[in-house]
Image: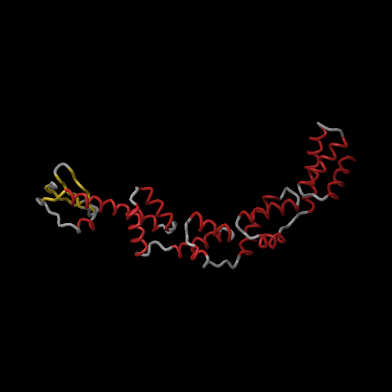
Amino acid sequence: MTGKREIVEIKFNKKGQAVVQFGAESLTIPPNVFTNYYLFEGKEISEDDIKKIKKEISNETLYKYGLRLACKMSYSTKEVRDKLNAKGDDKLATKAVINRLKEAGFLDDESYALEYKEEKEKACFGKNRILDALRFDKGVSDSIINSLRFKDEEEHASRYLHAIENKYSRISYQEKKRKVHDSLIRRGFDGHVAYSVLNELTTNKSEEKKNLEKIAFNTLNKYKAKYNEREARQKTFESLMRKGYSSKDIIRTLEDLAND
């Protein structure tokens, strides 16, 4: 026969929670759980009911945690589920919390995906990067992902290009184009979008000439320490070609250095 314990005292704390004393043990019970049971001082309550109350308290604590996450509006259903599962191994409790949050409108992957897309577009991310994150990191369904529309890819790519082009101001124009193109692809833009906005890249011929002269001078001196004059010039030429400078500009620069 299941034993019973007497409720010796019930108090309410500042949060409105009931602190119920069962002999030497006490439970702090949230209001919505407390109202599910007819509890009063002097009542005898079974061990089974105590277990049920503890289970409801645990579920309510899990729900409040899930609610805090959902209210931040920065998590998908999958991310909230993963965080809830990390709190314990009760998959049914997690599923119940997710359902409650969805029914209350706190979890909505369709709205989340749209807000995530708009936020990342403002930060100059391309379609491919956004979709991969939603699909693989956020766990958003394909039906929602396929409903998203991307209309201003070139505009976002252009903003990103102008934000980073100064980073490559000390390299050749061709190498600059290659690096900016690769950066746009990594950022999530399609190849045709990247090529389209590359026409907006600017170059300073005078500055590029100075950079070439400086790089050629340093490279040539480095190779002269190991090779004869002809071999040093050849290796310098090859190195500068790999950096994207034209053969015509390299030859002229090396000739200028030889005449100095």
When the figure is inspected, residue 158 is found, relative to residue 42, above or below; the finding is below
**Residue at left 36%, top 55%?**
66
Residue 4 placed where, x, y %? 12, 47
Q: Position of residue 129 (x, y in %)?
A: 57, 57
Residue 257 to residue 13: above or below: above
Residue at 50 percent of width and 63 percent of height: 142
Q: How many marks?
A: 0
Q: Position of residue 91 (x, y in %)?
A: 35, 52
Classify residue 198 as left or right of residue 84. Answer: right
Left or right of residue 23, residue 103 in this image? right
Relative to 232, does residue 11 appear above or below in the rendering? below
- Residue furthest top as drawn: 225
**Would you identify the image quadrant in which residue 195 lies?**
bottom right
The picture quadrant where one finds residue 121 is: bottom right
**Frontmost residue, 181 versus 138:** 138
Question: Where residue 125 sits: x, y (%)?
Answer: 58, 58
User: Looking at the image, which residue sits at the far front?
Assistant: 1
- Which quadrant of the rendered structure holds the C terminus? top right
Residue under the point 75% across and 55% down: 203
- Name, please, the residue furthest toward the left: 42
Instruction: Name above or below for residue 217 compared with residue 158.
Output: above
